[in-house]
Image (tube, grey):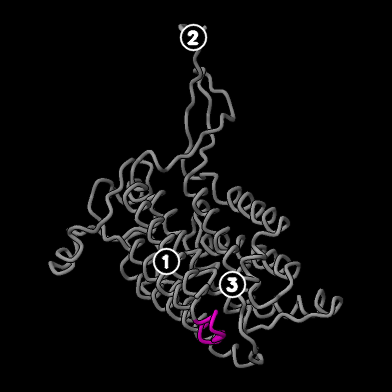
């Protein structure tokens, strides 16, 4: 019964978060979180560094995903110290990859890609687990079961990216085409379910002039599909079907990435079939081949162990550090700046 309540609680949380984001985040006031004065200009104003809601929401999604990983892996009795080390290794690989691959594919310095980071994570994750087993595990007498960890990582990523779509809505990126350019059938389906971005600093506005136009809500569609996949994967994991949980979440997310790229209007490279689609297909093939290499784990997870692991003081501090690191990486806007003017309010003196 605990497993069912946990899955239902996850479903309720995601539904409320996505509903709030859909209604709120396209607004102009939900792009910039703060502006920090950096350099004084000749006219008395200051040039500012913009901190974005994109960074805040991305960091929250990262942290939420890591929290899911800790709960699921902790439910199988895996040591918390090994989870922390593995998570740090994965983040050390995937976070830089999100910027490096975007630069290589899109030839733009101020952009990030989740798709590229996922591909690098899928390729490296099994071997990072083996590395932890051969070093920390060998020294301390434990071994991380690869199928269990791959399933937990895949589910955590699925939820993290579902929540991370809210960051895209906030910044106005990863957007779909205008409904006016879609087929009459598509226009009827999405007549009451679309996204309208406000503000000239949204990417949809400065890249394609699509502010205040009804757009296909590809970000929300992705978030819903990923949420459903994550919930199914969580249920399979808690029932001990680790291989099925891994393949269900990875296949759904990567197949949908291939499909959804055809419904996006933002620039994704010069190829008709983008590098991100190729990487998604590569991740599917690679994961299908690599999973049988490792022996299957036995035993049923105990969700109470996982929930207890989440409340460990060291884990709480670790999650806070993950959030800070992710925000510092993605929260500083490279494509916008600001002008700040400070004044004295005379009637308050």
Left or right, 279 with respect to 88, comes to left
Tell me the distance, in whole angstroms, between the alpha carbons under discs 1 and 2: 49 Å
| 177 w.r.t. 251: above or below | above
Tell me the crowding category of disc 3: few under 14, some 14 to 19, or many 20 or more residues within 10 angstroms, Cα based: many
Magenta residues, start to end: 236-246
Is residue 292 in sight in this rendering? yes
Q: Earlier in the sequence, mark 2 or mark 3?
A: 3
Left or right, 26 with respect to 91, comes to left
Residue wearing tag 2: 348
**Nearer to us in this view, 43 or 20:** 20
Question: x, y percentage for residue 218?
Answer: 32, 63
Label 3 sits on a secondary structure element that is helix
Residue wearing tag 1: 11
Q: How many labels sit on residues?
A: 3
| 210 w.r.t. 98: above or below | above
Residue wearing tag 3: 120
At a point 51% along the width and 34% down the height, the residue shown is 35
> Answer yes or no: do the residues labelled 2 and 3 have beta carbons within 8 Å?
no
Label 2 sits on a secondary structure element that is helix
Q: For residue 139, what is the image quadrant?
A: bottom right
Q: Earlier in the sequence, mark 3 or mark 1?
A: 1
Q: Earlier in the sequence, mark 1 or mark 2?
A: 1
Tell me the distance, in whole angstroms, between the alpha carbons under discs 3 and 1: 28 Å
Based on the picture, tell me whether residue 240 belongs to the magenta stretch.
Answer: yes
Question: x, y percentage for residue 56?
Answer: 52, 48
**Nearer to us in this view, 72 or 185:** 72
Question: x, y percentage for residue 289?
Answer: 56, 90
């Amino acid at each position: 019964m605990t497993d069912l309540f946990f899955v239902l609680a996850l479903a309720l949380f995601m539904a409320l978060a996505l509903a709030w984001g859909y209604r709120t985040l396209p607004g102009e006031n939900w792009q910039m979180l703060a502006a920090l004065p950096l350099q004084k200009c000749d006219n008395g104003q200051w040039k500012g560094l913009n901190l974005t809601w994109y960074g805040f929401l991305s960091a929250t999604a990262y942290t939420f995903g890591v929290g899911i990983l800790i709960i699921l892996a902790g439910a199988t009795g895996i040591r918390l110290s090994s989870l922390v080390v593995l998570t740090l290794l994965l983040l050390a690989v995937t976070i830089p990859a999100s910027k490096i691959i975007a630069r290589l594919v899109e030839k733009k310095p101020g952009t990030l890609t989740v798709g590229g980071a996922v591909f690098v994570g899928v390729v490296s994750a099994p071997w990072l687990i083996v590395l932890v087993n051969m070093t920390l595990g060998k020294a301390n007498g434990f071994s991380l079961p690869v199928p269990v960890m791959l399933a937990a990582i895949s589910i955590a990523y699925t939820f993290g990216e579902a929540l991370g779509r809210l960051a895209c809505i906030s910044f106005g990126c990863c957007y779909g085409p205008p409904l006016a350019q879609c087929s009459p059938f598509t226009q009827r389906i999405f007549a009451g379910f679309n996204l309208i971005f406000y503000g000239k600093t949204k990417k949809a506005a400065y890249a394609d002039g699509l502010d205040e136009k009804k757009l296909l809500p590809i970000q929300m569609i992705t978030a819903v599909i990923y949420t459903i996949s994550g919930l199914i994967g969580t249920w399979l994991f808690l029932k001990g079907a680790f291989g099925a949980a891994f393949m269900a979440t990875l296949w759904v997310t990567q197949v949908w990435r291939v499909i959804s790229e055809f419904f996006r209007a933002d620039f994704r490279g010069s190829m008709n079939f983008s590098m991100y689609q190729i990487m998604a297909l590569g991740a599917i093939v690679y994961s299908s081949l690599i999973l049988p290499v490792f022996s299957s784990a036995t035993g049923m997870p105990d969700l109470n162990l996982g929930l207890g692991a989440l409340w460990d003081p060291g884990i709480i501090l670790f999650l806070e550090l993950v959030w800070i690191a992710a925000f510092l990486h993605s929260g500083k806007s490279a494509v916008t700046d600001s002008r700040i003017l400070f004044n004295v309010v005379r009637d308050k003196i």
